[in-house]
C-alpha cells in the first residue's frame, strides 16, 4: 500500500478549510435557543468529514479534537443539548483552533499546544456542564450511556470485515488508526481465514481483528469509528470493566531488567549492530540521522536504553524523559512508522546477541515496553489531554522548535499564494463548449485549403467561417478570463465573523452591511486585499464606531453600521469601508502629527491633507493601545500593501458622522465594456459604465467661465467641457465645434463632457497595463489591443478630472491655446516638440 | 543592410565561441553603438505606434508585441539628435531592461539601422572619456575598437530607466 498520500493530503486540507468555513458561517447563523436542526446538521457534517479525513491521514490530534466538537454537535442535533450563546462561542473558537492546527500541520509547523489544550478544556468543561443544565433531556442522555460507564476502562472489539468490504473503498487500517486516537489499543490480527496464496483473491478481505481499547469512552464513540462500515462487517463490542485506572499495559519490569543486564556488557556492540541493521533494512530513515555521526548516535541510544531500564520503576521520570526525547525526535522528523522499524530491529538485534538465552517471554516484554515508549514519545508530538500529559511536556514543547522552522514557514507561505483555484463547473463547461465550436470552425475553414480554385461562393463561405472564428475566439477569451475572476464575496465572507467577535470584545453594537459582493476581481488581487481589508474594518470598529451609550448621546442609533461596498469604476475595482461612527478627529490628528514632527505649526492644511496624515508610519491617536488596534502599525502598512498592488487608499471623514475608506485597485485582467472614440487620428476607449450620455454639440450652449474653461449647458446642468486633444496635447481635425460630439462621463458624482471627433463602435476590451513595461500615465487606466492589432488607450475618467483641473487652473492657461504649453506638463526634463 | 527591416533572428547573428561578450551594434547618426546581445529580444521593422499623451517626444508611443504593450523610444530624439524620417533601414530593437527594483521590462528603441555582431573581449572594453559624441557619457558603459572602428557600448539599464522613465516605479497618485 505505498500509495503517495501527499496528493490526497493536499485535497484533504483544502476540503477541511472549506468545511471550517462552512462551520463558521453556519455557527454564526445559528439562532440561539431555537436552532434549526438542518443548520446544526450542516455543521455536524463538516466536522464529521474533517474528523474522518484526519483519521485516515493519521492526524490523531485533529481527529480527537474534532471528535469532542462532533459529540457536542451531535447532542445539539438530537436536542439533548441546548444551543447556548456560550456553546456557540466555544465552538467558534474551537473552529479557529482547528483551523490553526490544520494550517500548522499543512506547513509542517509545531502545533500550538497551549491553545489546543485550552480549547479542549473549554469544550470538555462545557460538555460536563451541559449535563447538569439541560435538565430533562439530560436524563435520556445519561440513559443512553449506561451507568456503569464510570467503571468501564476499555473495550474489547471483535472486528470482522465482510469479504467484500474493500470493494466499498473502506480500509480497516483507518478504523484501527482512529481507535488508536481514542486511547491505547492492542490489536491482534486473526489470520485463520486466510486461504493459501494460490487461492487468495486480493480484493477480498480475510482478516479479522481483536482489538482491546484502553480508554473509558462511551460505546457510542467506539461505534462511531465503525459508522461507515456498519453494514460491511461483524462487530462485537464488549466493555471491559476493571479495577484501577491503569491504561497502559503492565510492563514486565523484572524481565526487562534482567534481560537488559544480560545484554549490558555487549552494549556497544548492540547499538552498533542495531544501526547497521536498521540502515540496511530501512534505508529511508538514513536522512533523519544526517546531523549526527554514527558514533555519537550509538552513545545516545545506549544512554537512552540505560535510562529507560533504570527508570522502569520510576514512571514519572521516565515519561518526562521520553517526552523530551519525543520532542527531539519530532524535530529530527521521526514518524510513527519509524518507531515500529526501530522496535523490530532492536528486538531482532537483541535476540541475535542474546543467543539461546532469548525467550519469547523476553521478546514480549520488550515488544510491550517499546510500544509504550514509542507511544509516549509520539504522544509528546501532539499531546491531547486524553493521554499522559505532564505539565513539563507542555512547557517544553515550544522550546527549540520555532527558530528551526520559521524559514520553512515563510517558504511555504510564498509558495502557497500561487496554489490552486476552484472554478465552478459551469465555467469549465462553457470553456469546453467554446473549444468544441472552435474545432468545428477550424475544420470548416480547413476545407478551403484543399480547394483548387476559389470561386465567389467559396469566398462567401470563408467569410462566414471567419466571422464565426472571430466569435469563437472572443468567447474563448472571455471564458478563460472568467476563470480567474472571483466575486469579491470570497474576501468579504470572513467579515461577519470578525465583526461578531470584535463587537463582543469591544462592547459595541455593530451591524455589518455588505453590498456589491458579486463584483468580480482577479484572484491574485483578492488574496492580497484580504489583510488590508481586515485591518480597515477592525479600525473602523475600534476607532470609528462609538460605544452604545456615546452613540445614544450623539443622537444616533445605538447599533453602529459598518458598510462594505464594492463596485467597478473605470479600470478599477473600488472597495469602500463606510462607518457611521465618530469620524476622524482633526484636532487630535494635527496634535499628534505635530508631536511626531510630521507637520509644523504654521502649516495651513486642508481637512483632506490632515486626514491623510493617518497613513503615516507610527501614527495612532488611540488613547489606549488595545489588541485590536492602536499600535500605530497599521494604516501605513495598509497603504503600502495596497500600493504594492498598484492601488490607492484614501479616507473621507466628517467628524461626528463617520468615515469612508476607499480602496481603488486595478483590475489587472479585467475585461471592460468600452466605447471607442476618435480624437484626431487617435482612438481612445471610454469605459461604458462611466458614460452617461453622448450629445451632438450645440455651440450656443457653450459658456466660457473666465479662467476656468468652458461649460456646456445640458438641460439644467452646467457641465465642464474637456477637450481631449487639449489635455492630451495631440493634433485634432475638428475646428468646427458643430461637428464634434460630447460624451458626458461621470465619476464620483461629478460629470464632465469629453469633446471627441467621432464615436466609433462599442466592444469588450481586455485591459493591458501600461505599467508593466512603461509607467502610469495620468488620465489613462491602461491600454488594449484592437482587432487590427493596434494599441488603443483606455481613458481613466477619474484621472481626466484631475488632469483637467491641473491644466485648466494653471494661470497661463488660455482657452484653446495651441498645444505646446499643455505639451510640456507631463514632460519632465526634456519636452522638446518634434 | 537591405533586409534588416525584416525580422532578423538574433540567434543567427550570434557567432559561437570566444570569450568576452557579444554585442549587437546599430547605427545612429553615423556612429556605431553596441548593446549586450543577450538583452536583445528581437529586431523588427518600424511600424505605426500609438502615441501616449503627455509624454516626451522621444517616447514615440506603444506597440502591440504579441499581446504585450511595449513602449518605443526614438534614440535620436533621446540623445538630442535631429529627427530622421523613418526609412528602409530603420528598425526597432526590442530590449529587456532591468530596473533597480529587480523587475525587468520590455522596451523598443528606434535606430537608423542594425550593423553587426561583435565579440568583444573584456580587456578591449575601455572606459569612456568625456568627449563629443551625441550620447551623454553616463549612458556609456565602455568603448571599444573593432576593425579600426569605434564602438560605443551602451548601458541600457541606465539609459532606459533614467530621467523620464525612472518615474516608472514610483506610484503616481
Image: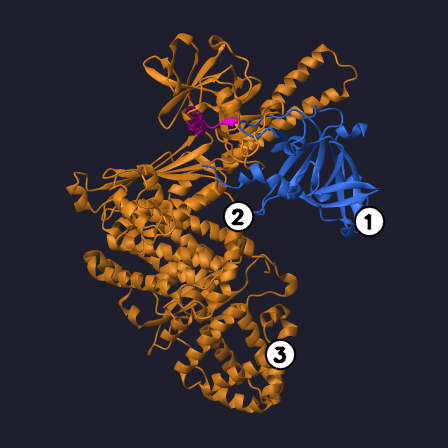
Q: Is residue A84 visible?
A: no
Q: Position of residue A178 (x, y in %)?
A: 44, 62
- Give the number of callouts: 3
On whether residue A196 falls in the magenta region, the answer is no
Chain B palette colour: blue
Residue A828 vertical placement versus A248 (above, below) = above
Marked residue chain, label 2: A
Q: Position of residue B17 (x, y in %)?
A: 82, 49
Label of residue A555 in the image: none
Which residues lie in the magenta part? A794-808
Mark 2 on the same chain as mark 3: yes
Q: Disc 2 and disc 3: Cα gap in Å?
A: 40 Å
Q: Disc 1 and disc 2: Cα gap in Å?
A: 42 Å
Direction right: furthest residue: B147
Residue of label 1 = B17
Q: Quadrant of the N terminus of chain A?
A: bottom right
Label of residue A419 in the image: 2
Marked residue chain, label 1: B
Residue of label 3 = A294
The residue closer to the viewer here, A34 or B79, is: B79
Marked residue chain, label 3: A
Amino acid at each position: 500500500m505505498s500509495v503517495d498520500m501527499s496528493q490526497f493530503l493536499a485535497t484533504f486540507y483544502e476540503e477541511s478549510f472549506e468545511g471550517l468555513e462552512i462551520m463558521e458561517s453556519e455557527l454564526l447563523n445559528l439562532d440561539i435557543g431555537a436552532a434549526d436542526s438542518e443548520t446544526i446538521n450542516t455543521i455536524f457534517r463538516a466536522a464529521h468529514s474533517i474528523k474522518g479525513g484526519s483519521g485516515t491521514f493519521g492526524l490523531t490530534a485533529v481527529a480527537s479534537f474534532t471528535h469532542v466538537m462532533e459529540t457536542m454537535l451531535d447532542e445539539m442535533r438530537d436536542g439533548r443539548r441546548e444551543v447556548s450563546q456560550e456553546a456557540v462561542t466555544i465552538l467558534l473558537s474551537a473552529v479557529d483552533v482547528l483551523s490553526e492546527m490544520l494550517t500548522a500541520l499543512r506547513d509542517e509547523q509545531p502545533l500550538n499546544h497551549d491553545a489546543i489544550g485550552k480549547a479542549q478544556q473549554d469544550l470538555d468543561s462545557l460538555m460536563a456542564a451541559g449535563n447538569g443544565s439541560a435538565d430533562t433531556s439530560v436524563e435520556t442522555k445519561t440513559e443512553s450511556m449506561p451507568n456503569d460507564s464510570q467503571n468501564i476502562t476499555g473495550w474489547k472489539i471483535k472486528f470482522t470485515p465482510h469479504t467484500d468490504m474493500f470493494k466499498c473503498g473502506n480500509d480497516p487500517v483507518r478504523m484501527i488508526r482512529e481507535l488508536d486516537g481514542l486511547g491505547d489499543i492492542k490489536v491482534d490480527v486473526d489470520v485463520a481465514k486466510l486461504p493459501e496464496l494460490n487461492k487468495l483473491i486480493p480484493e477480498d478481505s480475510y482478516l479479522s481483528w481483536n482489538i482491546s481499547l484502553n480508554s473509558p469512552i462511551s460505546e457510542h464513540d467506539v461505534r462511531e469509528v465503525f459508522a461507515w462500515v456498519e453494514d460491511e462487517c461483524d462487530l462485537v463490542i464488549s466493555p471491559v470493566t476493571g479495577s484501577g485506572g491503569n491504561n497502559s499495559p503492565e510492563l514486565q519490569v523484572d524481565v526487562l531488567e534482567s534481560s537488559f543486564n544480560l545484554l549490558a556488557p555487549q552494549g556497544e556492540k548492540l547499538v552498533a549492530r542495531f544501526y547497521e541493521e536498521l540502515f540496511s533494512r530501512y534505508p529511508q530513515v538514513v536522512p533523519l540521522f544526517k546531523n549526527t555521526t554514527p558514533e555519537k548516535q550509538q552513545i545516545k541510544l545506549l544512554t537512552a536504553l540505560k535510562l529507560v531500564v533504570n527508570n522502569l520503576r520510576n514512571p514519572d521520570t521516565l515519561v518526562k524523559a521520553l517526552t523530551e526525547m519525543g520532542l527531539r525526535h519530532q524535530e529530527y522528523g521521526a514518524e510513527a512508522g519509524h518507531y515500529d522499524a526501530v522496535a523490530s530491529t532492536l528486538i531482532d538485534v537483541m535476540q541475535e546477541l542474546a543467543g539461546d538465552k532469548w525467550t519469547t517471554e523476553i521478546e514480549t516484554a520488550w515488544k510491550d515496553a517499546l510500544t509504550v515508549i514509542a507511544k509516549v514519545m509520539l504522544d509528546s508530538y501532539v499531546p491531547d489531554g486524553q493521554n499522559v500529559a505532564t505539565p513539563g511536556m507542555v512547557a517544553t514543547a515550544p522550546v527549540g522548535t520555532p527558530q528551526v522552522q520559521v524559514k520553512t514557514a515563510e517558504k511555504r507561505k510564498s509558495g502557497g499564494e500561487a496554489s490552486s483555484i476552484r472554478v465552478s463547473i459551469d465555467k469549465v463547461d462553457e470553456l469546453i463548449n467554446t473549444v468544441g465550436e472552435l474545432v468545428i470552425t477550424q475544420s470548416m475553414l480547413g476545407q478551403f485549403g484543399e480547394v483548387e480554385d476559389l470561386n465567389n461562393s467559396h469566398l462567401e463561405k470563408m467569410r462566414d467561417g471567419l466571422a464565426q472564428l472571430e466569435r469563437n475566439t472572443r468567447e474563448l477569451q472571455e471564458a478563460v478570463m472568467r476563470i480567474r475572476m472571483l466575486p469579491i464575496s470570497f474576501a468579504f465572507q470572513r467579515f461577519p465573523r470578525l465583526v461578531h467577535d470584535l463587537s463582543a470584545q469591544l462592547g459595541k453594537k455593530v451591524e455589518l452591511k455588505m453590498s456589491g459582493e458579486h463584483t468580480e476581481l482577479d484572484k491574485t488581487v483578492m488574496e492580497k486585499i484580504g489583510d488590508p481589508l481586515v485591518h480597515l474594518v477592525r479600525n473602523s470598529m475600534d476607532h470609528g464606531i462609538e460605544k452604545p451609550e456615546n452613540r445614544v448621546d450623539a443622537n444616533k442609533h445605538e447599533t453602529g453600521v459598518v458598510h462594505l461596498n464594492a463596485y467597478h469604476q473605470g479600470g478599477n475595482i473600488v472597495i469602500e469601508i463606510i462607518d457611521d461612527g465618530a469620524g476622524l478627529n482633526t484636532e487630535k490628528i494635527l496634535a499628534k502629527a505635530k508631536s511626531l514632527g510630521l507637520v509644523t505649526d504654521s502649516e495651513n492644511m486642508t481637512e483632506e491633507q490632515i486626514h491623510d496624515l493617518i497613513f503615516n508610519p507610527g501614527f495612532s491617536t488611540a488613547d489606549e493601545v488595545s489588541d485590536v488596534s492602536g499600535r500605530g502599525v497599521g494604516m501605513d502598512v495598509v497603504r503600502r500593501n495596497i500600493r504594492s498592488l498598484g492601488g490607492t487608499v484614501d479616507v473621507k471623514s466628517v467628524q461626528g458622522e463617520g468615515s469612508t475608506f476607499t480602496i481603488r485597485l486595478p483590475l489587472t485582467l479585467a475585461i471592460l465594456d468600452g466605447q471607442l472614440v476618435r480624437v484626431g487620428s487617435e482612438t481612445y476607449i471610454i469605459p461604458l459604465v462611466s458614460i452617461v450620455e453622448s450629445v451632438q454639440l450645440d455651440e450656443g450652449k457653450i459658456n466660457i467661465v473666465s479662467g476656468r474653461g468652458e461649460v456646456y449647458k445640458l438641460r439644467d446642468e452646467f457641465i465642464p467641457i474637456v477637450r481631449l486633444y487639449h489635455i492630451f496635447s495631440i493634433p485634432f481635425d475638428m475646428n468646427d465645434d458643430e461637428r464634434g460630439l460630447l460624451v458626458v462621463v461621470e465619476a464620483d458624482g461629478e460629470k464632465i463632457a469629453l469633446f471627441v471627433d467621432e464615436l466609433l463602435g462599442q466592444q469588450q476590451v481586455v485591459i493591458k497595463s501600461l505599467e508593466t513595461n512603461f509607467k502610469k500615465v495620468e488620465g489613462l487606466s491602461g491600454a488594449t489591443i484592437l482587432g487590427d492589432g493596434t494599441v488603443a488607450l483606455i481613458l481613466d475618467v477619474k484621472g481626466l478630472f484631475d488632469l483637467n483641473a491641473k491644466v485648466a487652473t494653471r494661470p497661463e492657461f488660455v482657452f484653446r491655446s495651441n498645444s505646446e504649453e499643455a505639451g510640456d506638463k507631463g514632460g519632465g526634463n526634456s519636452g522638446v516638440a518634434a | 543592410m537591405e533586409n534588416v527591416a525584416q525580422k532578423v533572428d538574433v540567434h543567427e547573428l550570434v557567432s559561437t565561441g570566444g570569450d568576452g561578450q557579444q554585442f549587437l551594434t546599430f547605427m545612429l547618426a553615423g556612429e556605431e553603438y553596441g548593446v549586450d546581445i543577450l538583452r536583445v529580444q528581437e529586431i523588427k521593422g518600424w511600424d505605426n505606434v500609438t502615441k501616449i499623451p503627455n509624454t516626451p517626444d522621444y517616447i514615440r508611443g506603444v506597440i502591440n508585441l504579441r499581446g504585450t504593450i511595449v513602449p518605443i523610444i526614438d534614440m535620436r530624439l533621446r540623445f538630442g539628435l535631429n529627427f530622421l524620417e523613418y526609412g528602409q533601414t530603420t528598425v526597432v530593437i526590442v530590449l529587456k531592461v532591468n530596473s533597480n527594483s529587480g523587475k525587468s521590462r520590455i522596451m523598443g528603441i528606434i535606430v537608423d539601422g542594425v550593423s553587426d555582431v561583435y565579440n568583444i573581449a573584456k580587456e578591449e572594453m575601455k572606459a569612456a572619456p568625456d568627449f563629443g559624441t551625441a550620447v551623454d557619457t553616463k549612458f556609456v558603459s565602455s568603448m571599444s575598437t573593432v576593425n579600426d572602428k569605434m564602438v560605443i557600448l551602451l548601458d541600457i539599464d541606465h539609459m532606459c530607466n533614467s530621467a523620464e522613465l525612472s518615474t516608472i516605479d514610483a506610484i503616481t497618485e
